[in-house]
Amino acid sequence: MLKSRMLCTVCLYTVLAITAWADQAVLHMEIGDPERKNREVELRLDGITDTDTGDIITPRQLAERLADTRLLFVGETHTNLDFHNVQFKVIQELHRANREVMIGLEMFPYSQQALLDGWIDGLFTEQGFVKQSEWYTYWGYHWEYYRDIFLFARDNGIRMYGINSPRDVVKAVRKKDFKDLSPEDAKHFLHEVQPVTDDQRRMFRGFFDADDALHMNAQAMEGMLRAQATWDATMGWNSMQALQDHGGENAIMVVLIGSGHVTYGLGAERQTAPYYDGKIASVIPLEIMDDEGQPVKTVRASYADFVWGLPSPLDTVYPTLGISLMGKLGDRPTKLIQVSEGSVAERAGLIVGDVLLRINDQPVDSFTTLRLIFAPARWGDVITALVERDGEELALEIPIRRNTADQAGYQ
């Protein structure tokens, strides 16, 4: 399976959002909670492991064990439907347990709160909400991955909250230190961002192997870590504030967030803990097979409070092209700066440096436009692309097919 499925699509001009692990080493690091970092616990398919006790429990028992938890981070790999099904089951079980469930959303900045309120209040059709909320601008991952959660929240009056920071602010932190931010950017931080630790540096590097195309020098890595800490702090802070401002005594804020922001308690949880005196917990789904097809039988107990074993999918439910775009520069259209190995785009002949002009005869002027055009595509479809390469226009037919190399081990 492709590593591009394990990480969010990354571009040197955007902030990295880690959502999963690159190899098994990350699962077994002796970092995080001192009480648990020196032992391993079992990972079982479709089972939930309580890493404190080692018990394999059910979703209902999970809800029971979260009775005194008010802030819960549930990790995800954005393009894995099983991960989102775990999030949905956690929300359902807490709702059945008569908890006042609230949902925090990484995919929305807090500036979009009015639209989320409108969704829960029934002011939008589904299509209207996706369009008006600019889903494919702020997030970009397929709406269908999250659809069941959003419909369940609306139908049951469960309030949803945008917890992210405006993306431009995180970019500014990546390029500069906190002390060098402009007054306009600095106003988004009403609290201190905890400094990056050596454990975080070690974990962060573990997400990349030595041959990764995005391997970076120490200065670039520190910029990424600063941005990640900013992201963690903002999402943790906004989740806590929404819980305290709007939740009752029985409330639990369930935060849907990339697993890399939760792993080993070093992200959003560590950033929030100094300001919150309640109990915080984490649930992280994990695939029971790694990138090399080797079974994952155990995980470090400090990885999360609860780990949920999942099968390894052959590919994403909804197809992706596997490209990153530089974005429009002046009057120039979007240029490809990354084409993932083994991706749909690479197998169709797209290469780094191509300027993407049109998809299915529709002009591509931004990554958002590309996402909107590509969203209806399904495996087995064929799309057409017009690109400019070396000053000449080239028409390409792009079959949307799974990678046969990924399938070989499953035949």
Image (cartoon, rainbow, N blue to C red):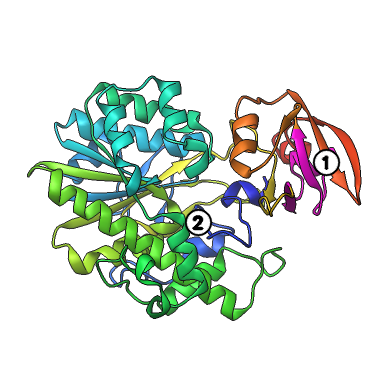
Residue 334 at what x, y percent from top left?
Answer: 71, 47
Asked whether residue 52 is in view, the answer is no
Which residue is disc 2 drawn over?
Answer: 17
Q: Name the residue under label 1.
A: 387
**Apparent side of residue 378 relative to residue 281 in the rendered image (left or right):** right
Residues in magenta, as a range: 333-358
Q: Is residue 111 magenta?
A: no
Query: Is disc 1 surrounded by few (<14), some (14 to 19) or many (20+) residues within 10 Å?
Result: many
Place of residue 397 in the rendered image (x, y in percent of width and height, measured from the top left): 84, 30
> Which sits in the foreground, 240 or 366?
366
List x then y, in percent, for residue 110: 32, 48
Residue 85 higher or lower than 333, as above or below: above
Which kind of residue does numbered mark 2 sit on? Ala
Counting residues from the start of the chain, the first of labels 2 and 1 encountered is: 2
SS class, disc 2? loop
Quadrant location of residue 1? top right
